[in-house]
Amino acid sequence: MEVGRWEISSEVRRRSGRLQHVTEEVRHCNDSKLLFMIPAADGILDEGGCQFSSSQVSPRDFKLTSACMVRRAGVVRTEASVTVENAQAFEIRIEPRDKKNPLVTQKGRWIGPCEAAGEKGTK
């Protein structure tokens, strides 16, 4: 995946059926794999933080797993499917593991490189 500026469009479908759409621009100027480190759940992360793993299912498809220590919830695990369309586009689908968690779909589109020398880090 390209490093640089990305537009991330998220759609969250709550169990009630309500849809929430959010679009944001993020910068990953050193390491684009940070685009795929998705926390396992809403909530405050405990000191243990998160562990991430991935496996390749096909040339374009991957399975991501995260396990996070969440305050008052313990270890929360999430699995996501990722389809990489090319070095500048991807889609992530996070399936709910229980009734409390929503279905989340994210689409990422590369916008361009990080322009200024001050944009070398992840923002």
Image (cartoon, rainbow, N blue to C red):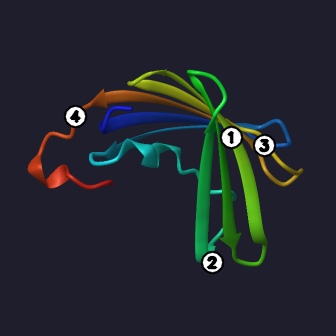
Task: Report how far apart the C-alphas of labels 1 and 3 lie in the structure.
Answer: 17 Å
**Mark number for residue 80?**
1
Is 19 positioned to the left or the right of 17 in the image? Answer: left
The residue that disc 2 covers is 46
The residue sitting at the right extreme is 99
Quadrant for residue 96, please give it.
Answer: top right
Where does the N terminus fall, quadrant-wise? top left
On the image, the x and y values in percent for residue 45 come to 61, 72
What residue does disc 4 label? 113
Q: Give the label on residue 47, or none.
A: none
The first of marks 2 and 4 along the sequence is 2
Residue topped by disc 3: 14
Mark 2 in CB contact with mark 4 (< 8 angstroms)? no
Tell me the CA gap for discs 2 and 4.
Answer: 34 Å
Distance CA(mark 4)–CA(mark 3):
34 Å
Rounded to the nearest angstrom, the CA distance separating label 3 from label 2 is 25 Å
Q: Earlier in the sequence, mark 4 or mark 3?
A: 3
User: Which amino acid, mark 1?
Assistant: Ala
Question: Gap between marks 1 and 2, in whole Å?
Answer: 22 Å
Question: x, y percentage for residue 30?
Answer: 28, 48
